[in-house]
Image (cartoon, rainbow, N blue to C red):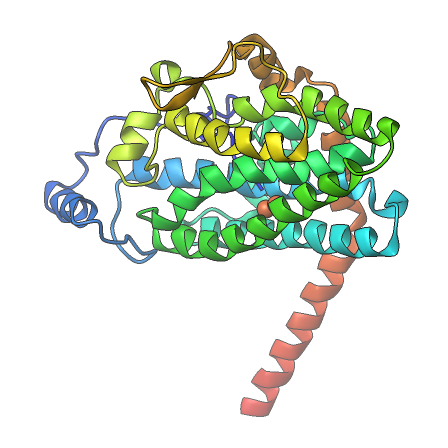
């Protein structure tokens, strides 16, 4: 999954980068600028301004963290899926998210930051991840809604990233987006089945939509006017579409889907505006968003504790893999001698 526009600052220690263009080396800077202006790709071996590098490390690592923390709310439901078919689909989806994390950590590593450094940032609570995963999945309908709306919002955010100016990130996103599309459709299909069921099942779907709708709108990040990093990220070809424009696209795409599904989106101000040719919508609670981003959501502590425990429990696997790799290297060296 997922992004919250990926331009929220990390906590002190992994602080956001200066937005002024680099003056480190005017000649290399000019070459970099012209490549960006021509819509070309920047590759790991190319010179790049330090601020561009740091912005990408922050964005890609926040994205990677979101993928692996995003495995947790849905992973909770693997053992409680209502049928073998749904269990197999959910296992595949959660596994995909782990894979997305791996592609993204690898892409960030090409910028010179190690995976250990990035994971330290996550485990110490300094690095951010998408705030949506700090909310609980209370019942099976939540799993469907996460697929439909959370993965749906992720796709909207991530498709423009396939054209990101940094080559390894852009290429990783192509495969990620294809898989996110499957995630979105499996969620929507699961909900369609529930909406053909009992009154109780229909009420569960509506309740899940009510709880997730506003949080999904906040996933696109703060309004453009409050989004300090966005202008520079757009100049660098990292970000292609503004937070508010992406949010609007998501709302316009989702309203007809909600109608087909037979649920109401919980916003009395949501209506088609003929003049704008878009839907108008109500106020997002940004205080709640920032409070959750800053560690005070209902599941922040639980998510972090689960991640830290998983990392500690996996230490012996990393040790064994390293020992094996060293053994192989020694063997190869001896054979070559
Ligand atoms: Fe994902
Ligand atoms: Fe996903």
Q: Is residue 116 left or right of 141 when viewed as pictured?
A: left
Q: Is residue 51 left or right of 243 when viewed as pictured?
A: left
Residue 16 visible here: no
Q: Nearer the viewer, residue 288 or 25?
A: 288
Residue at the image point whose x is 61% and y is 77% from the top: 329
Q: Nearer the viewer, residue 321 or 35?
A: 35
Residue 293 at what x, y percent from top left?
A: 59, 20
Residue 122 at what x, y percent from top left?
A: 61, 35
**Above or below: residue 100 compared with residue 273:** below
Residue at the image point whose x is 59% and y is 91% from the top: 335
Residue at the image point whose x is 89% and y is 43% from the top: 80
Residue 256 at what x, y percent from top left?
A: 54, 32
Quadrant location, the C terminus: bottom right
Q: Is residue 239 left or right of 290 when viewed as pictured?
A: left
Q: Nearer the viewer, residue 167 or 253?
A: 253
Residue at the image point whose x is 64% and y is 83% from the top: 331
Q: Quadrant of ligand 2?
A: top right
Residue 86 visible here: yes
Rendering quarter of residue 321: bottom right
Q: Nearer the viewer, residue 29 or 221?
A: 221
Rendering quarter of residue 57: top left
Quadrant location, the N terminus: top right
Rendering quarter of residue 310: top right
Residue 268 at what x, y percent from top left?
A: 57, 10
């Amino acid at each position: 999954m997922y992004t919250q526009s990926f331009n929220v600052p990390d906590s002190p220690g992994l602080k956001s980068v200066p937005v002024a263009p680099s003056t480190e080396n005017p000649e290399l800077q000019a070459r970099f600028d012209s490549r960006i202006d021509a819509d070309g790709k920047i590759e790991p071996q190319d010179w790049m301004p330090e601020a561009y590098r740091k912005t990408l490390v922050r964005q890609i690592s926040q994205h990677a963290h979101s993928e692996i923390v995003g495995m947790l709310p849905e992973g909770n439901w693997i053992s409680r899926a209502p049928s073998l078919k749904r269990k197999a689909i959910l296992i595949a989806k959660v596994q995909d998210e782990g894979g997305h994390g791996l592609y993204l950590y690898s892409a960030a590593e090409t910028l010179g930051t190690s995976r250990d450094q990035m994971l330290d940032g996550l485990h110490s609570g300094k690095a951010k991840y998408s705030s949506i995963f700090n909310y609980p999945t209370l019942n099976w309908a939540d799993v469907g809604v996460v697929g439909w709306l959370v993965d749906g919002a992720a796709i909207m955010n991530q498709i423009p990233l396939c054209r990101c100016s940094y080559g390894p990130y852009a290429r990783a996103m192509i495969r990620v987006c294809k898989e996110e599309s499957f995630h979105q459709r499996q969620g929507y299909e699961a909900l369609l089945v529930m909406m053909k069921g009992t009154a109780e099942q229909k009420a569960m779907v509506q309740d899940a939509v009510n709880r997730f709708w506003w949080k999904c709108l906040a996933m696109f990040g703060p309004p453009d006017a409050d989004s300090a990093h966005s202008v520079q990220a757009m100049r660098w070809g990292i970000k292609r579409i503004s937070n508010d424009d992406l949010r609007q696209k998501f709302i316009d795409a989702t309203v007809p889907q909600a109608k087909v599904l037979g649920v109401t989106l919980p916003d009395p101000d949501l209506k088609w505006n003929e003049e704008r040719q878009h839907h108008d919508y109500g106020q997002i609670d940004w205080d709640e968003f920032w409070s959750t981003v800053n560690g005070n959501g209902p599941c922040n502590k639980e998510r972090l504790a689960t991640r830290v425990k998983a990392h500690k429990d996996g230490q012996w696997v990393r040790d064994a893999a390293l020992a094996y790799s060293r053994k192989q290297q020694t063997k190869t060296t001896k054979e070559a001698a």
